[in-house]
Amino acid sequence: MSLYLGLDFGTSGARSLVLDRSGTIHFQANYPFTNCSSVAEWQTALMSLIEQIPQPLRSQICAIAIDGTSSTVLLCNSDGQPVAEPILYNDARAIVVLDQVRAIVPPNHTVLSATSSFAKLIWSSQQPDFSSVRYFLHQADWLAFLLHGQLGISDYHNSLKLGYDVERLCYPDWIEALPFRDLLPRVVAPGTPIAEIDSTIADQVGLPRNCIVCAGTTDSIAAFLASGVKTPGEAVTSLGSTLVLKLVSQTRVEDSRYGIYSHRLGDLWLVGGASNTGGAVLRHFFSDAELADLSQQIPVHQESPLNYYPLLRPGDRFPVNDPHLLPWLEPRPDDRGAFLHGLLESIARIEAEGYRLLQSSGANELKRVYTAGGGAVNQPWSVIRERHLKVPVRRSRQTEAAYGTAQLAMPSSNLIPKLTA
Ligand SMILES: Nc1ncnc2c1ncn2[C@@H]1O[C@H](COP(=O)(O)OP(=O)(O)O)[C@@H](O)[C@H]1O
Ligand SMILES: O=C(CO)[C@H](O)[C@H](O)COP(=O)(O)O
């Protein structure tokens, strides 16, 4: 039996999921991170998750795909070794070069954000260790390289925030003109077979030597793919460590003022944005068990009077694209249930404002929202969110991003319809 392995690298951990062609799950596992910015931990998680798959299943895995957090980037030397710490998706250090970015790219372009991969590239080009850099890669690209040994290959989901033109399927002239353009990866469609796994790695982790490693995607697009949503007007909200919105639209929308961008899905667009609010703020104050317990006691049909902007540190990407935006978590009630109600209600308000912006910017009218990620289990939160969204809110058929990534590894999965440039 042919089996397909999806590996999802998020913020709080990595997950594996093994599927067959009928969509039946044969195995899944989780690897919680102690430090989500440690490439050594990423590498350990990758090999550990593969080795946790029972050998009878492992020997039937014929293809693998990996998703990672979008615009998490690494600078690597000619051997593929990182020459510096990775720059995570929500790291806004590149704010200091935003004026230089603005002078290079078209007005309002997706990469006009302190957290875009392109801004991080410009920032990195001005650092002392840049002379030793040979490859500029995304997290998913580098993890796939560890398996197939091919450096400098990415997918057009991870490369959107690098400035790759996903309509013309090429780098724009303003990137081709860069003096360090040769550091950038060759870009292929997500799910494209890249190469058989390196034979030494295959033997080391017990995978078949003819196992194919495919191009990947981003974590929130993997969650979208897992949901099975395809219809314009339907949307997927990823309630993970962050809050990520994706609305299926027939029109592309791009507006860097609000952090709105569009990923390509065949001839449709995933119009959306990614906020730094979300589960990471909840986890700072509550354990998962407390979240489950206290959420059940919330009077969900009453709107909390507490109006927060829940962030762990200054800066948001969407629907407010402002690296200086301050967290707002006052007043703090003594009652922990009331505090949680205020947090869930406030994140629901931000989600609703996000979808309102997407629609007013030209995306299809919102009809229904499916929920993915760790927060998808929270039914009381779904009721609160539905009150603000004013459309049905349902849990995705599959809430694990790794499910979508495993589907991406299936040949002719038609998840990413073949594009014509
Ligand atoms: N019952 C719950 N209600 C709301 N959020 C939850 C619940 N259980 C877990 N979470 C949140 O889910 C998040 C982890 O979700 P996950 O999809 O694994 O995130 P990521 O992939 O971004 O690391 C945590 O930040 C946690 O706060
Ligand atoms: O917030 C994030 C981490 O989970 C990523 O930015 C998320 O992947 C959103 O980016 P994209 O829409 O490109 O997938």
Image (cartoon, helix red, strand yellow):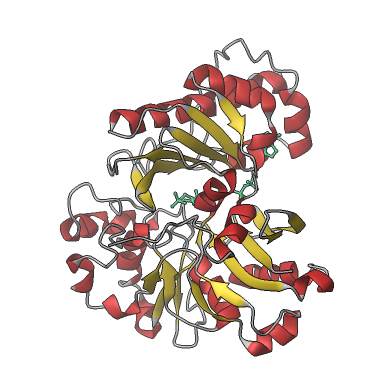
- The residue at the point 54 percent across, 43 percent down is 242
Indicate the position of residue 335 as horizontal and vertical percent values: 71, 18
Which of the 4 image quadrants contains residue 144? bottom right
- Looking at the rendering, in which quadrant would you find the C terminus? bottom left
Examine the rendering and report whether any part of residue 312 can be seen: yes
- The residue at the point 27 percent across, 67 percent down is 170
Indicate the position of residue 51 as horizontal and vertical percent values: 77, 72
- Looking at the rendering, in which quadrant would you find the N terminus? bottom right
Examine the rendering and report whether any part of residue 316 can be seen: no
Indicate the position of residue 155 as horizontal and vertical percent values: 43, 66
Q: Quadrant of ligand 1?
A: top right
Above or below, 72 relative to 358? below
User: Which residue occupies the foreground of this view, 181 or 413?
Assistant: 413
Indicate the position of residue 78 as horizontal and vertical percent values: 44, 87
Above or below, 147 relative to 306? below
Which of the 4 image quadrants contains residue 28? bottom right
- Left or right: residue 44 versus residue 242 is right
- The residue at the point 67 percent across, 70 percent down is 46
- Left or right: residue 202 versus residue 105 is right
